[in-house]
Image (cartoon, grey):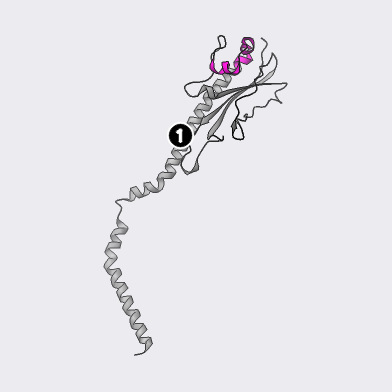
Amino acid sequence: MSAKSDCASEAGSVLQSLTGFIGRRAPGFSRFARASEAATAVEFALIAPAFLATLIAVFQTCVFMFAQTALQNAANTAARYFLTGQAQNNGCTASQIINGGCGTLAGVCPAAMFTCANMYLVVQNYSSFSSASTSAPAMYNGSTAITSYAYNPGTPGDIMVVQLIYAWPVIGGPLGFTLASLPNGSAEMVGASTFRVEPY
């Protein structure tokens, strides 16, 4: 018998064995394809990381925006003290405006949401509204926290910008989501008000 015939015979034998193997395993493959008992668990395992990341991102953003609104309201209250001359007439310091203790003026820090010792008041006056700067003050110089800010109470007719700034602590979420903008892993939050001081 020739080598060509031997090869053809061996190929036929292998093909026959493979066909028999597939035939014997076909019912098992068919059952595997139809099986759906753990489909929900597998689908959840695939979707869960993205779902949890989105949920945490939405929750953190909502809390941040709620706190931002509270800080802006506090900044508006602080601005009113300077607008009406109460802070100037009472000789209030930045700490007293934040925490209270300046005559009849109540502190502006919402202690239920913020650590008042970590809140800073920035008070500046300008010659015109066009020159007034409301950009967020830097809270860090490199990796060093800045704890001293301008405090220049105005006089009647001055243009003033009053800002409350706070480093809001955030937790990094799955898949790299974070609101952090500061070296310590916090997000800078700012409430600001611009106005002309009334006669007092």
Q: Please tell me whether residue 126 is drawn above or below residue 173 in the rendered image.
A: above
Judged by its main secondary structure, the magenta piece is helix
Q: Please tell me whether residue 165 is drawn above or below residue 3 in the rendered image.
A: above
Residue 143 falls inside the magenta stretch: no
Residue 89 falls inside the magenta stretch: yes
Residue at (42% x, 44% y) in the render:
49
Q: Residue furthest bottom?
A: 1
The amino acid type of the residue labelled 1 equals Phe
Q: Residue furthest front?
A: 144
User: Where, by quadrant of the figure, is residue 1 drawn?
Assistant: bottom left
- Left or right of 98? Residue 124 is right
- Quarter of the figure that contains the C terminus: top right
- Left or right of 52? Residue 9 is left
Compare residues 109 and 101 and report the one nearer the observer. 101
What percent of the width, then of the height, locates residue 196?
67, 18
Q: Residue furthest right?
A: 127
Please rate how many residues cluster around mark 1, counting C-alpha atoms within 10 Å: few if below 14, some from 14 to 19, many from 20: few
User: Where, by quadrant of the figure, is residue 135 drawn?
Assistant: top right
Segment colored magenta: 80-101
What percent of the width, then of the height, locates residue 175?
47, 44
Residue at (36% x, 83% y) in the render:
8
- Left or right of 177? Residue 200 is right
Disc 1 marks which residue? Answer: 59
What percent of the width, then of the height, locates residue 6?
35, 85
SS of the residue at dot 1? helix
- Numbered disc total: 1
Q: Please tell me whether residue 108 is drawn above or below residue 52 in the rendered image.
A: above
What percent of the width, then of the height, locates residue 70?
52, 24
Residue at (45% x, 40% y) in the render:
54
Q: Please tell me whether residue 176 is drawn above or below residue 126 in the rendered image.
A: below
User: Where, by quadrant of the figure, is residue 83 drawn?
Assistant: top right
